Structures are given as C-alpha cells and as structure tokens.
Image: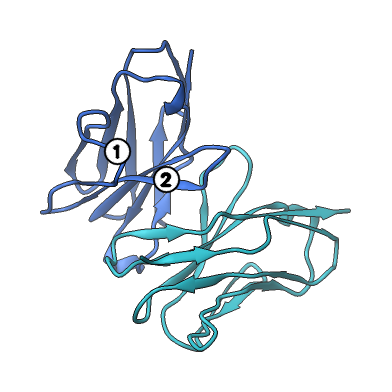
C-alpha cells in the first residue's frame, strides 16, 4: 500500500541554520504530496502541497520539490528560527484521493 | 480561510463510559471528513473516512460499533467513543477536505481524551 517515510525522528539546529527534513514516499501514479506542521497542543496545520513532478510547494520560507524519480519531497528552509520548533509531517494523498497518509513526523528543535 | 473547529478541546471520562466529540467546518463545505487518533506512540491512526453520498468507511481495528460517526451536512460531523478504555486515550483529530481547496485536509485542534 501507499506509505510515507521520514528518516529523521528528531532534528536539532541553531537559529539561522539550514534545514532539511527528508521525506520519501511509495505510491503508484502521481499522488499529491503535503507538508504539515504541528505545534504543541494544536492540530496539524497545512503548510503546502505539490501535485506533479518537479513542482515546488512553499510557504513561510519552507519549500519542497516533488521528485518522482527519487520519490522524494524533502522539506527545506534556508534559515530557521526558534519559532519553527515543532513537529513536521510529510503526507500524501493516497490512490483513494480522499485518504491522506502521514509519515511518523520529525521533531525540529531550534536553539536560540 | 478554511477553519475547522473541534469541541470539546479536552475531556475526561471514566472507564466504560462514552463521550461524543464534534467537528465543524467554517468557510468551506467539507465533502469528506476523516477522523484520526494521535497517540504519543503512534502517528496518525485513521479511524474512518466519511464522504458525502458514500457510506462511512472504517479502517482496520476501528468499527462503527465502537466509534459511531454522524456526518449530517457539509459543515458538521460528530464521533462518539463508546465504552472508552485506557487504550482509547489520545488526541482525536478531525480532518476536513473539499475539492475546491485541493487534496489536503484541514484539521481542527483536536479533542484530547483522557480515560480514568
């Protein structure tokens, strides 16, 4: 079945560091790919999506490019801030387009 | 913008009792609503998916008898946890989707269930 893999469970950075959180997916066809961010005590917030190969999604300084060849959708940000500390989830819209499948999440800690 | 409200935000119930939680979409029509449970050990467990004009589809390990869901209109859904036990603890999330906003789901803040 469809799946999403996030290899990093935790990432610790200092402010202004460059961020990469890896996301790989397994699915047939061209699933829609998403990034969500979840702050403590809140539900996950939609960051952005990409729906086709080489499409770049972006929001709030975060970006990711849909890569069908490597089946990846890695999240990047050029300069992180302490306020970016949160859990980030990569997700895909499954072959059943109504179903969204989430990765296990990556906890980002940004130190001042 | 697309907003999703959930009520209550937190609830405590005694083991063996039931509790109902609600999900309200504001600013858009939720043609599908997905209910998830998020626990510290696991990521999002999809409980069921409710789509307009289709039967509610429950995932493996979740049943209508335990988690009955109502989706009476395009802005409201409710789910009840019947006969709750310790393993039902967690954050219950409602994710609502509409085609006009893409394939993503918009989530409410969740209902945190504690079972004593």
User: Position of A65 compared to A111: left or right?
Assistant: left
Is B101 in front, or is A12? A12
The image shows residue A54, relative to residue B9, as above or below, that is below
In the depicted structure, whether residue B9 falls above or below residue B57: above
Give the colour chain B carries in the figure: blue
Is there any visible trace of residue A65 in the rendered image? yes
Query: Closer to the N terminus: mark 2 or mark 1?
Result: 2
**Chain A, colour shown:** cyan
Q: Residue at x 53, y 85 (%)?
A: A67
Res B30 label: none
Q: CA distance from mark 2 to mark 1?
A: 10 Å
Q: Which residue is mark 2?
A: B45
- Asked whether the beta carbons under mark 2 and mark 1 sit within 8 Å of each other, the answer is yes
Q: Residues within 10 Å of mark 1 (few under 14, many from 20)?
A: some
- In which quadrant of the rendered image does the N terminus of chain B lie? bottom left
Q: Is residue B30 visible?
A: no
**Would you identify the image quadrant in which residue A81 lies?**
bottom right
Task: Tell me where residue B102 sits by quadrant.
Answer: bottom left
Whether residue A7 is situated above or below residue B38 in the rendered picture: below
The secondary structure type at the circle numbered 2 is strand
For mark 1, what is the residue?
B62
Question: How far from the left and from the top, in percent, is residue A17?
Answer: 84, 68
Q: Quadrant of residue A12?
A: bottom right
> Does residue A59 appear to the left or right of A33 in the view shown?
right
């Amino acid at each position: 079945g469809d799946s999403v893999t996030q290899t990093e469970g935790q990432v610790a950075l200092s402010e202004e560091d460059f961020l990469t959180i890896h996301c790989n997916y397994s699915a047939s066809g061209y699933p829609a790919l998403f990034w969500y961010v979840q702050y403590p005590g809140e539900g996950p917030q939609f960051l952005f999506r990409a729906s086709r190969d080489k499409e770049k999604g972006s929001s709030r300084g975060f970006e990711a490019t849909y890569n069908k060849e490597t089946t990846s959708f890695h999240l990047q940000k050029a300069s992180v801030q302490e306020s970016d500390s949160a859990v980030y989830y990569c997700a895909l819209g499954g072959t059943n387009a109504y179903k969204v499948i989430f990765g296990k999440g990556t906890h980002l800690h940004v130190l001042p | 913008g697309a907003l999703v409200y959930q009520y209550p935000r937190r609830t405590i119930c005694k083991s063996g009792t039931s509790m109902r939680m609600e999900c309200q979409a504001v600013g858009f029509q939720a043609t599908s609503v997905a209910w998830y449970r998020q626990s510290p050990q696991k990521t999002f467990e999809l409980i069921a998916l409710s789509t307009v004009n289709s039967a509610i589809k429950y995932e493996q390990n979740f049943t209508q008898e335990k988690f009955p869901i109502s989706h009476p209109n395009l802005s409201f859904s409710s789910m009840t946890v019947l006969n709750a036990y310790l393993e039902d603890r967690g954050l219950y999330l409602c994710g609502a989707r509409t085609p006009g906003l893409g394939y993503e789901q918009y989530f409410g803040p969740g209902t945190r269930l504690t079972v004593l």
